[in-house]
Image (tube, rainbow, N blue to C red):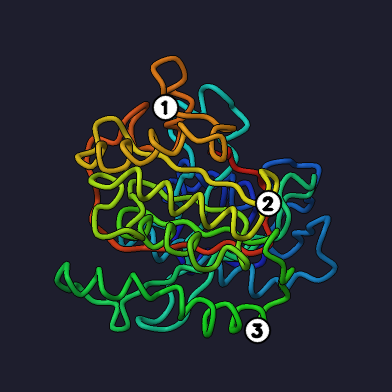
């Protein structure tokens, strides 16, 4: 199917079966057929929408086609093949990526499932680097340590003033990988009054200094525990999902900190990567149980309006 062949009269089944949309073409439309109807792009109806612009539908499908023909990825899986085999329902999830303008603000929006499996959410991909360019490690460390100020003073107010969000800490999560995970720990230290859920992936807390999780795990755990006690938080007031692959070069950096944290009653209510449940604890890693490489890209993700509960330390 050529780009010009995609019109309001194009059959939906033809779009789904298009080789350039394999194997995710079916996910362009709701996975549950009970939530949509129609045979062509122009006749498409969605159960939870009162208005659908056929011209916009055609524009989107043409965009996907053009991106695919250029070899640009359009669809991104969320779960690994191991997770999908364990729970086949996870085959019906993923992100469709619309490229914006370089340097411009961007967001990922989800209308949510018709069954209410997930509420509408906004995913904001932010960075602590003002220029959004590669830089030396020292500058990264300097900038990530103060990103919490930008989040509080600029980013979060912008999100809540420009989008229809549930402006409550109970509806916000913050996550990052590598130095983004370090940033996530800083958010926990300084902005826990704004965020309830934290997902640091492959990174330790540097509140007591660079590589604090590795070299000063006790002092790091002491400080994190002090923060919770000062706020008089109970176990229901925050959730932390921290993970690192057993093959990750920074395993000790993260493992030392988490091992120490779980000696404290404050943090001992959640799961941990022990030999008996390591596979379950590592579900977000790149290979079945371990992260064999450690990507050095910088990224933080702030979730607004999500109802998902994450395993708590």
Q: Are marks 2 and 1 in contact (CB under 8 Å)?
A: no
Q: First in sequence: mark 2 or mark 1?
A: 2
- Residue at 20%, 75% in the rendered image: 139
User: Looking at the image, is mark 1 or mark 3 earlier in the sequence?
Assistant: 3
Q: Residue furthest toward the left?
A: 136
Mark 1 vs mark 3, CA separation in Å: 40 Å
On screen, residue 281 above or below 99? above
Q: Quadrant of residue 250?
A: top left
- What's the residue at 43%, 46% (across, down)? 19
x, y percentage for residue 171?
Answer: 69, 60
Image mark for residue 129: none
> Looking at the image, is mark 2 or mark 3 earlier in the sequence?
3
Residue positioned 39% across, 47% down in the render? 201
Horizontally, residue 119 falls left or right of residue 80, namely right
**Nearer to the camera, 29 or 120:** 120
Question: Which tag is nearer the camera, tag 2 or tag 3?
Answer: 2
Q: Secondary structure at mark 3?
A: helix
Question: SS at mark 1?
Answer: loop
Task: Answer few, some or many: residues within 10 Å of disc 3's Cα (few below 14, many 20 plus, some between 14 and 19).
Answer: few
Residue ranking furthest to the top: 276
Return the x and y of residue 299 as percentages of the image width and height. Answer: 36, 63
Q: Which mark is residue 273?
A: 1
Could you classify mark 2 by the number of other residues whose Cα lies within 10 Å: few (under 14), some (14-19), or many (20 or more)?
Answer: some
Query: Is residue 32 or residue 156 the one in the foreground?
Result: 156
According to the picture, the residue beneath numbered tag 2 turns out to be: 237
Residue 276 appears in which quarter of the rendering? top left
**SS under mark 2:** helix
- x, y (%) of residue 124? 52, 69
Asked if marks 2 and 3 touch (Cβ < 8 Å), the reply is no
Seen at 50% across and 76% down, the residue is 151
Residue on which disc 3 sits: 162
Comparing 108 with 100, the one in front is 108
């Amino acid at each position: 199917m050529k780009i010009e062949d995609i019109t309001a009269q194009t059959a939906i089944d033809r779009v789904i079966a298009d080789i350039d949309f394999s194997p995710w073409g079916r996910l362009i439309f709701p996975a549950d057929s009970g939530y949509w109807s129609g045979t062509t792009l122009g006749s498409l109806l969605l159960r939870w929408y009162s208005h659908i612009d056929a011209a916009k539908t055609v524009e989107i499908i043409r965009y996907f086609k053009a991106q695919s023909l250029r070899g640009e990825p359009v669809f991104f899986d969320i779960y690994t093949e191991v997770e999908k085999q364990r729970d086949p329902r996870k085959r019906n999830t993923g992100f469709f990526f619309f490229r914006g303008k370089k340097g411009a603000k961007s967001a990922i929006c989800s209308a949510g499932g018709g069954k209410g499996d997930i509420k509408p959410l906004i995913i904001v991909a932010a960075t602590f680097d003002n220029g959004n360019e590669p830089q030396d490690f020292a500058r990264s460390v300097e900038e990530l340590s103060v990103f919490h100020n930008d989040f509080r003073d600029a980013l979060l107010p912008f999100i809540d003033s420009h989008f229809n969000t549930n402006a409550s800490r109970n509806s916000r999560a913050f996550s990052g990988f590598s130095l983004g995970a370090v940033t996530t720990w800083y958010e926990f230290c300084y902005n826990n009054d704004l965020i309830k859920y934290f997902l640091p992936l492959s990174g330790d807390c540097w509140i007591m200094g660079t590589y604090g999780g590795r070299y000063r795990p006790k002092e790091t755990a002491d400080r994190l525990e002090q923060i919770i006690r000062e706020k008089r938080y109970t176990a229901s007031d925050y959730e932390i999902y921290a993970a690192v692959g057993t093959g990750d070069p920074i395993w000790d950096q993260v493992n030392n900190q988490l091992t120490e944290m779980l000696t404290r009653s404050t943090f001992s209510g959640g799961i941990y990567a022990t030999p008996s449940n390591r596979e379950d604890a590592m579900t977000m890693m790149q290979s079945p149980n371990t992260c064999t490489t450690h990507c050095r890209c910088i990224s933080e993700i702030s979730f607004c309006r999500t109802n998902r509960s994450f395993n708590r330390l």
